[in-house]
Image (cartoon, grey):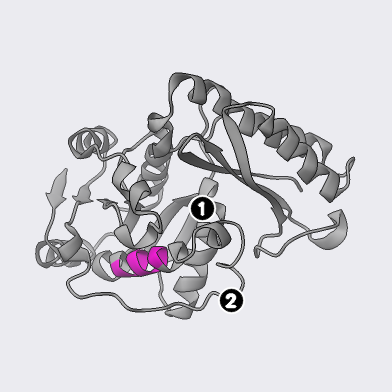
Amino acid sequence: MEKYVKVSELKPRLSELRKDRTVGFVPTMGALHQGHLSLVERCRSMCGVTVASIFVNPAQFNDREDYRRYPRTLECDLEILENAGCDIVFAPTEEEVYPERDNRVFDFGTLDKVMEGKFRPGHFNGVAQVVSRLFDIVNPDKSFFGQKDFQQVCIIKSMVKQLNLTTGIVVCPTVREQDGLAMSSRNMLLSEIQRKEAAGISRALFHAKQQAGVMTVTELRDETIRRINLSPELKVEYVETVDAAMQTVSEWDDAEEIFACVAVHAGEIRLIDNVQLK
């Protein structure tokens, strides 16, 4: 496995490889888990070269304390990626990704005004900045993202369209722990009791999936909130039902595909998850 920290060294290497191979890209912020590895595996199955990046992007943290707390495990991550068969790792400094201040402001319409965008203002603009910058550096044929970050995937697809990029976006299923908790780098920050109780998030979502069409949409949202908040360790920030374009759904006939998306606080740690209801 090759490791690069300099854009000036990575780009010519990828240009050489691209002559006879497709390039796949898995952007990460490190603290890798099986969910990330499922993206690497999918990338390897579809592309001739698998590139992963490790970069904790300050531009997408509206809470500086959250940025400070975010786990950083570079040496362990490198070992994990090598064992997973990753070909190239790009682990740049902030100066390499942003040699100049990125003042771009993207217009995502209502996409970034709801759910995560409502509670984390500026977050998705920071995501668009860093992903577009990484795409410019790597120039991948395909890039791989997890369904757990449902709204982020919608934002990135919109960004690709706005910038007329040719990179294909491949969305991969959420990977879960044995008790159902969606895998997340933030899980390692949970206390033992918080980690145990956090499984209640997915239990509530799977119950919602079973009740879709039985309860009204409003009843289902209220019941999901109630079930999660039964744990004294958990506090719901939002539960939203949306269609594939992130539009709020109020009736089961409003859309062909409907998703339940949640954000929950376990102490100071914020967790997100979603399931497709229809």
Residue 140 included in the magenta stretch of the image: no
- Secondary structure at badge 1 equals strand
The segment highlighted magenta reads 126-133
Name the front one of labels 2 and 1: 2
Tell me: residue 208, above or below residue 232: below
Residue 134 left/right relative to 34: left
Observer-nearest of 6 and 172? 6
Magenta part, dominant SS: helix
Tell me: residue 250, above or below residue 75: below
Observer-nearest of 110 and 39? 110
Observer-nearest of 5 and 144? 5
Residue 185 left/right relative to 138: right
Which sits earlier in the primary sequence, circle 2 or circle 1? 2
The picture places residue 251, in percent across and down from the top left corner, at 86, 57
Quarter of the image with the N terminus is top left
For marks 2 and 1, give the CA distance. 22 Å
- Secondary structure at badge 2 equals loop
Q: Mark 1 points at which residue?
A: 171
Q: Residue 249, which numbered label? A: none
Type of residue at label 1? Val
Residue 60 visible here: yes
Tell me: residue 176, above or below residue 7: above
Which residue appears at 79% of the width and 34% of the height?
Answer: 210
Residue 202 left/right relative to 48: right
Q: Name the residue under label 2.
A: 109
The picture places residue 253, in percent across and down from the top left corner, at 87, 58
Which residue appears at 13% of the width and 55% of the height?
Answer: 5
Observer-nearest of 99 and 192? 192
The local crowd at label 1, few if under 14, some if 14 to 19, many if 20 or more residues have their Cα within 10 Å, is some
The local crowd at label 2, few if under 14, some if 14 to 19, many if 20 or more residues have their Cα within 10 Å, is few
How many numbered discs, if any? 2
